[in-house]
Amino acid sequence: MPQLNSLPGAPANLFLDFDGDIPPSGGRMDYPWSLDDAPGFSRSEQAFIRDTWAHVAEAYSPFNINVTTVDPGDFNLPLRTLHV
């Protein structure tokens, strides 16, 4: 999985989740994104992830936000409001 960041250290992150997650018991299953349903990410899938990240990062470039593919690990952090 490419680990991409558009603005490390920004006060807010927009996490693009391509690899899914196995939730704690009782949670909703979040399946990984895939073009071919094979395990892992092929070169073409990695290129698609990079291209998608680049387009989203460009769209959010006027704002002080980091567009990332790096899982923050803790989604229970306080929410931040972006004034645009």
Image: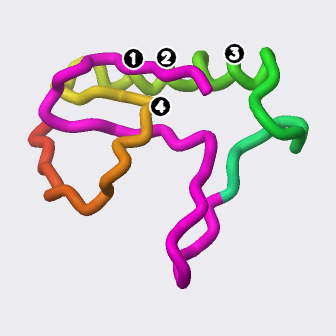
Q: Earlier in the sequence, mark 1 or mark 4?
A: 1
Q: CA distance from mark 1 to mark 2?
A: 6 Å
Question: Circles 1 and 2: CB distance less than 8 Å?
Answer: yes
* Magenta range: 1-30
Closer to us: 9 or 67: 9
Q: Residue 26 has which mark?
A: none
Q: Is residue 38 above or below residue 48?
A: below
Q: Is residue 4 above or below residue 73?
A: above
Image spot of residue 3 (x, y percent):
49, 22
Q: Is residue 8 above or below residue 41?
A: above
Q: Residue furthest bottom?
A: 26
Q: CA distance from mark 3 to mark 4?
A: 13 Å
Q: Earlier in the sequence, mark 2 or mark 4?
A: 2
Question: Circles 2 and 3: CB distance less than 8 Å?
Answer: no
Image spot of residue 10 (x, y percent):
17, 26
Q: CA distance from mark 2 to mark 4?
A: 11 Å
Q: Give the residue drawn at x 54%, y 84%.
A: 26
Question: Where on the picture, by quarter, is residue 9?
Answer: top left
Asked if the stretch drawn in magenta spans residue 28, the answer is: yes
User: Which residue is disc 1 drawn over?
Assistant: 58
User: Which residue is disc 2 drawn over?
Assistant: 54
Q: CA distance from mark 2 to mark 3?
A: 10 Å
SS for dot 2: helix
Task: Give, as a three-letter code, the residue at label 3.
Answer: Ala
